[in-house]
Image: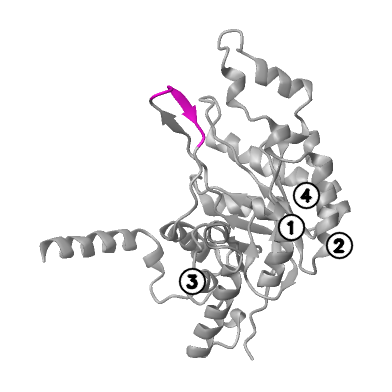
Amino acid sequence: MLDLTTTYLGLTLKNPLVAAASPLSKKITNARRLEDAGVSAVVMYSLFEEQIVNESRALNYYLNRGTESYAEALSYFPEMDHYNIGPEEYLGLIQKLKSTLDIPVIASLNGVSTGGWINYAHRMQEAGADALELNIYYIPTDFDITSAELEQNYIDLVSEMRQQIRIPMAVKLSPYFTALPSFARHLVEAGASGLVLFNRFYQPDLDIESLEVVPSLELSTAHEMRLPLRWIAILYGRLPADLALTTGAHNAESILKAMMAGASVVQPASALLLHGIHWTKETLASIEAWMERYEYESIQKMRGSMSQQAVADPAAFERANYMKALTSFDHRILA
């Protein structure tokens, strides 16, 4: 019998498909449907730092600074009360999900600074969350902040968050760091039990008719998986932390690749939103069929089998692969 079980953040999961943070977790009915379709855990949509401190004097100051000069400045910020449910409602939803679902519930906090808002990590734990995903989404636009200072801010945030909770914590990262392996190691040393690769920074668009900067959200595509796949293969076996892939996983083949690279779980969001919750059941069936065809008894047997440490040519994940790709493309053109 095939064994699809995996471990992630100290949790034993029935398979490697974990529903990523998305609007699907806002309703109990959808969470139940996700569980029925076969996901092994659910990451809740994020509670934002801004929602927690929205009424504080500090945030009020920064939101209003400069509005005398630019009357439209406040319109850049969303009305948080309408953007998402508030902190207390979020904690209540954790309790409802825990009482309804048999699979683990992973809470999600989205923030960038240290401060009182991180106390909510402890409250999420008390509400019953099995683990926490810290989603750090920050655009460094200050010319005076160096990369070293920025990274230290992240490390300090993870360290303070760890002091608040006993449950495992994963950190969701962007790929835009100068020396990702070193930074990842420091995050793990600060208290991260896992790393989620990668956060997708949604880029704004320009409306050339209204002359406005407008929000733009596009779901991931399959080719975007190559970036987190590469880094998971490089990091696997070198950090005492679990790795989760969360960008570009759109079919069974992508989940299998992630496992072979070294991921403990895959967190689909776009695939579920594009194809529907039933995509989970169909994908799991395809994974099992592939494993039977190629005589893999378990997910654990394939995990890390194509990581950088395991493949015959480790340099393929580095500069040599870049040169090989360019050469092969040249041959196609010149043929």
N-terminal-most mark, 2 or 3: 2
Q: Which mark is residue 257?
A: 3
- Between discs 4 and 2, the one toward the N terminus: 2
In screen coordinates, is 75 left or right of 205? right
- Other-residue count near label 3 (Cα within 10 Å), few / some / many at <14 / 14–19 / ≥20: many
Position of 72 relative to 117 (above/below)? above
Mark 4: amino acid: Arg
Q: Horizontal placement of 2 versus 328: left or right?
A: right
Report the Cα–Cα distance between label 3 and label 1. 24 Å
Is disc 1 placed on a helix, strand or loop?
A: strand
Quadrant in the picture for the C terminus: bottom left
Q: Is residue 213 magenta?
A: yes
Along the viewing direction, whichever of 178 and 137 lies nearer the viewer:
137
Q: The N terminus is located in which quarter?
A: bottom right
Q: What is the secondary structure assignment of the residue under circle 4?
A: helix
The answer to whether residue 178 is seen in the rendering is: yes
The image quadrant of residue 334 is bottom left
Identified by mark 3, the residue type is Lys
Farthest top residue in view: 68
Q: Which residue is mark 1?
A: 106
Mark 1–mark 2 Cα distance, whole angstroms, equals 14 Å
User: Residues at badges 1 and 4 in contact (C-beta under 8 Å)?
Assistant: no
Q: Which residue is mark 4?
A: 162
Sequence-first tag of 1 and 2: 2
Tell me: 315 left or right of 54: left
Is-magenta flag for residue 235? no
Q: CA distance from mark 4 to mark 3?
A: 31 Å
**Tag 3 and tag 1, C-beta contact below 8 Å:** no
The residue tagged 2 is 99
Q: Position of residue 164 (x, y in %)?
A: 83, 47
Three-letter code, disc 1: Ile
